[in-house]
Image (tube, rainbow, N blue to C red):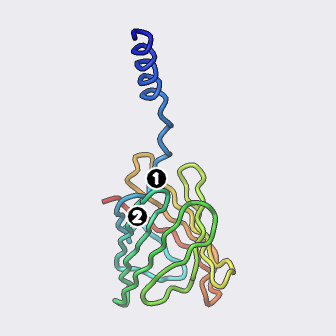
Amino acid sequence: MNRLLTAISALVFVLAVARPAPAQSDPRIGTWKLNVAKSKFDPAAVRKSETRTYELSGSTVTAHSETVRSDGTRQEVSFDATPDGKDHPYTSNPPFFADTVSVRRSGNHFIGQSKKDGKLLFTTTDSFSADGKTMTMTSKGANANGESVNSVRVYEKQ
């Protein structure tokens, strides 16, 4: 009986200590607001405001952005994706010029490739400040009209 209690105690201890390591946290999770003054847009698709929200469910991240452009028009864009490098559909209103995004992770950076009909349009790299309060999104490539895209957007965590 004593041996059984000792074995059970040892098993409980091992199970308590030998838990799997937690998954690497995702610095995107939360709500982010665009700092227009610190951002640069080329071509000049200036935005009055933008709020991005990232929510985690299992290994899938739901990303949602609400943008008000300088002309007052609004756009909402969303996607559900895991950082697996596979194409995931965008949903948007009005329609976005890309129809899929693939996301992969490299350390604390996320690299997204936006495509239209399977053709790469632009790549966006998300980087984070050491304190996790600033996200910088750098996009390079072309838009659906073939115009060069080279923007740096700076967001602050809310």
| 105 with respect to 13 (left or right) | right
Question: Whole-percent x and y of residue 116?
Answer: 63, 83
Task: Name above or below for residue 61 compared with residue 3.
Answer: below
Q: Quadrant of residue 39?
A: bottom left
Amino acid type indicated by mark 1: Asp
Q: Please report the residue visible at 37 percent of the width from the left and 74 percent of the height from the top.
A: 50
| 140 with respect to 10 (left or right) | right
Split into 4 quadrants, where in the image is the N terminus?
top left
Which residue lies most toward the top here?
2
| 147 with respect to 33 (left or right) | right
Viewer-side residue, 26 vs 146: 26
Question: Whole-percent x and y of residue 55?
Answer: 39, 62
Mark earlier in primary sequence (2, 1): 1
**Element type at mark 1:** loop
Total numbered badges shown on the rendered structure: 2
**Residue behind mark 2:** 54
Split into 4 quadrants, where in the image is the C terminus?
bottom left
Q: Please report the residue visible at 58 percent of the width from the left and 77 percent of the height from the top.
A: 100
Task: Name above or below for residue 48 compared with residue 59.
Answer: below
Residue contact at pointers 2 and 1, CB within 8 angstroms: yes
**Residue behind mark 1:** 26
Q: CA distance from mark 2 to mark 1?
A: 10 Å
Which residue lies most toward the right here?
119
Q: Quadrant of residue 36?
A: bottom left
How would you rate the neighbour count of disc 2 (Cα within 10 Å): few for under 14, some for 14-19, many for 20 or more?
some
Amino acid type indicated by mark 2: Tyr
Which residue lies most toward the front here?
1
